[in-house]
C-alpha cells in the first residue's frame, strides 16, 4: 500500500507516475489539479457507434455482457475512436440482479423486463447474494481491460438500490414508478428488506470489479429524481450509503449519479460520494453550492445538444467548462447517456474541444 499527497491510500502499483491513478480523470475525482479537464460520456459504448451495432447485430444484450472478449472489445471502442479520458465497463445495471437469480431480459427499445415482478417477502428471498463466480465474466473482462487500457482508467459501475428496485417492482421501465412507490409507502419493512438485499448484491458486484482492477466506480441512481428529498432520505439514502460507505477502504473514487436530482444533490453527496453527477437541469456552479466544496462534480451537457449545429455545441461546452470551474474538481460528461442517434464525430470533436479549452485555461494559470 502507498499513500499519496492527499493522504489517500492507493493500491499497490496504482500510484506509479503516468498510471491510471495519476490520470487527469482520477486527479479531477480527487480534486487535484491536472493537465486538462477530463471527459467521458455515459453510454459512450453503445448504439451511436457503427462498430458497436455491428457486433450487437447478432448477439443479444445480456449475452454480450457475459462474453468477456465482447465486453472488452465494446468497452475499448469509444476509447479508440474518441480519445476519452476514461473507459466505462460495458455491462448493464441488471447484470448482477440476473446473476442473483432474478429472471429478466433486456428488450431492445424497451429496457429491462422482469418475468415475475417482486411484490412479497418471499420474492425478496429469491434474490440470492452473489459471489465472484456468479459474475466471473465481469471479473475476467476487467482484468483483460486493465491490461489493454494501460494508463487510461477503467470505471466500474452498478445500479443503486432505488433504481434497481424500480425495475424489479414495476417489472420494467416506468414513468411514474407508481408500483414502486406504492410498495415503499405501503410496506416500509418490505421496502427496506428489498433495498437492503439489493445493496448487498450491488456492493458485492462493485467489489468484484474493484478487486479485478477498476480505477473508479459509478453508482447509477438514475430514477432517484422521482422522489422528494424527505422521501429520498428516509427510503433510499441509508441503502445507497451502505453501498458507497462499504467501499471507503477500497481506495478508488466513487461517483454517484441520478437524473432530475436538483433537490437531492446535497443528500446524494452525503451518501459517501467523492464525485456527484449532475444532469443538464442544474448549472454546475449552482450544483456545487448545493453539494459543498469537498466533492467534485461530473456533467452536464444536455445529450440533445449534440444533435444541434456545431456552434451551439461549442457554446454549451464553453459554458459548462466555465461553470464547472466553480467546483473543486470537474469531470466533463453529459447530463445523461449518449442518444443512439448522436453523430459519433460530434462526440470526438467535443473531447478535443474540452481538452483544448481546458489546457489553455491551465496555461493562463
Ligand atoms: O457506456 C456505458 O455507459 C456503459 C454501458 C452501460 C449500459 N447500461 C449499456 C447498455 C451502462 C453504464 C448502463 C447502465 C444502465 N442500464 C442504467 C443506468 C444509466 C442510465 O442510463 O440512467 C439504466 C437505467 C439501465 C437500464 C437499461 N438498459 C435501459 C434503460 C436500456 C435501454 C433500452 C433501449 O433499448 O433503449 C438498457 C439497455 C442497454 N444498456 C443498452 C446499452 C448499450 C442498449 C442495448 C442495445 O444496444 O440494444
Image (cartoon, rainbow, N blue to C red):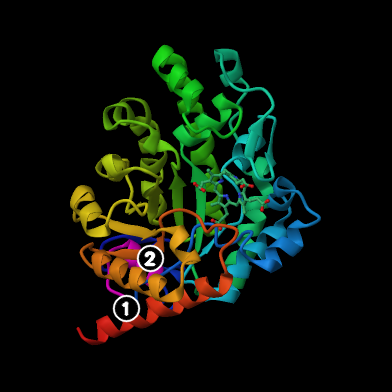
Measuring 51% from the left and 54% from the top, which residue is drawn there? Answer: 156
Residue 19 seen in the figure: no
47 left or right of 315 in image? right
Q: According to the image, label 1 marks what residue? A: 358
Measuring 39% from the left and 16% from the top, which residue is drawn there? Answer: 185
Q: Residues within 10 Å of mark 2 (few under 14, many from 20)?
A: many
Q: Which residues are magenta?
A: 23-34
- In percent of width and height, residue 347 lies at 51, 71
140 left or right of 33 in image? right
Q: Secondary structure at mark 1?
A: helix
- In percent of width and height, residue 322 lies at 25, 70
Task: Choose the circle earlier in sequence order: 2 or 1.
Answer: 2
42 left or right of 105 in image? left
Q: According to the image, label 2 marks what residue? A: 332
- Residue 22 in magenta stretch: no
Q: Are marks 2 and 1 in contact (CB under 8 Å)?
A: yes
Q: Quick one: which residue is furthest to the right in this view?
A: 58
Q: CA distance from mark 2 to mark 1?
A: 10 Å
- In percent of width and height, residue 342 lies at 56, 64
**In what quadrant of the picture does the N terminus appear?**
bottom left
Residue 21 versus residue 283 in the image, above or below = below
Where on the picture, by quarter, is residue 268?
top left
Amino acid at each position: 500500500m502507498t499513500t499519496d499527497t492527499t493522504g489517500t491510500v492507493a493500491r499497490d502499483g496504482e500510484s506509479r507516475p503516468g498510471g491510471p491513478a495519476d490520470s487527469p480523470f482520477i486527479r479531477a475525482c480527487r480534486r487535484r489539479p491536472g493537465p486538462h479537464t477530463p471527459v467521458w460520456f455515459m453510454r459512450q459504448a453503445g448504439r451511436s457507434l457503427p462498430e458497436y451495432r455491428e457486433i450487437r447485430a447478432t448477439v443479444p444484450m445480456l449475452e454480450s455482457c457475459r462474453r468477456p472478449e465482447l465486453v472488452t472489445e465494446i468497452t475499448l471502442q469509444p476509447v479508440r475512436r474518441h480519445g476519452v479520458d476514461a473507459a466505462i465497463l460495458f455491462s448493464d445495471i441488471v447484470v448482477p440482479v440476473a446473476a442473483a437469480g432474478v429472471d429478466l431480459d433486456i428488450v431492445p427499445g424497451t429496457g429491462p423486463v422482469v418475468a415475475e415482478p417482486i411484490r412479497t417477502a418471499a420474492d425478496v428471498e429469491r434474490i440470492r447474494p452473489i459471489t465472484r463466480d456468479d459474475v466471473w465474466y465481469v471479473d475476467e473482462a476487467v482484468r483483460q481491460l486493465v491490461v489493454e487500457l494501460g494508463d487510461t482508467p477503467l470505471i466500474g459501475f452498478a445500479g443503486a438500490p432505488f433504481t434497481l428496485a424500480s425495475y424489479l417492482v414495476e417489472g420494467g421501465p416506468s414513468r411514474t414508478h407508481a408500483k414502486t412507490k406504492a410498495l415503499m409507502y405501503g410496506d416500509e419493512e418490505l421496502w427496506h428488506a428489498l433495498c437492503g438485499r439489493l445493496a448487498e448484491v450491488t456492493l458485492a458486484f462493485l467489489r468484484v470489479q474493484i478487486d479485478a482492477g477498476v480505477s473508479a466506480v459509478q453508482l447509477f441512481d438514475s430514477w432517484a429524481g422521482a422522489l422528494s428529498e424527505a422521501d429520498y432520505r428516509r427510503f433510499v439514502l441509508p441503502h445507497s450509503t451502505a453501498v458507497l460507505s462499504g467501499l471507503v477502504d477500497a481506495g478508488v473514487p466513487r461517483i454517484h449519479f441520478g437524473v432530475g436530482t436538483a433537490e437531492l444533490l446535497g443528500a446524494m453527496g452525503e451518501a459517501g460520494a467523492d464525485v456527484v453527477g449532475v444532469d443538464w437541469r442544474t448549472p454546475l456552479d449552482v450544483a456545487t453550492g448545493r453539494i459543498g466544496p469537498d466533492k467534485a462534480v461530473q456533467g452536464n451537457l444536455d445529450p440533445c445538444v449534440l444533435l444541434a449545429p456545431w456552434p451551439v455545441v461549442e457554446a454549451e461546452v464553453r459554458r459548462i467548462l466555465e461553470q464547472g470551474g466553480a467546483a473543486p474538481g470537474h469531470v466533463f460528461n453529459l447530463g445523461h447517456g449518449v442518444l443512439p442517434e448522436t453523430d459519433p464525430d460530434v462526440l470526438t470533436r467535443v473531447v478535443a474541444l474540452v481538452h483544448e479549452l481546458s489546457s489553455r485555461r491551465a496555461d493562463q494559470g
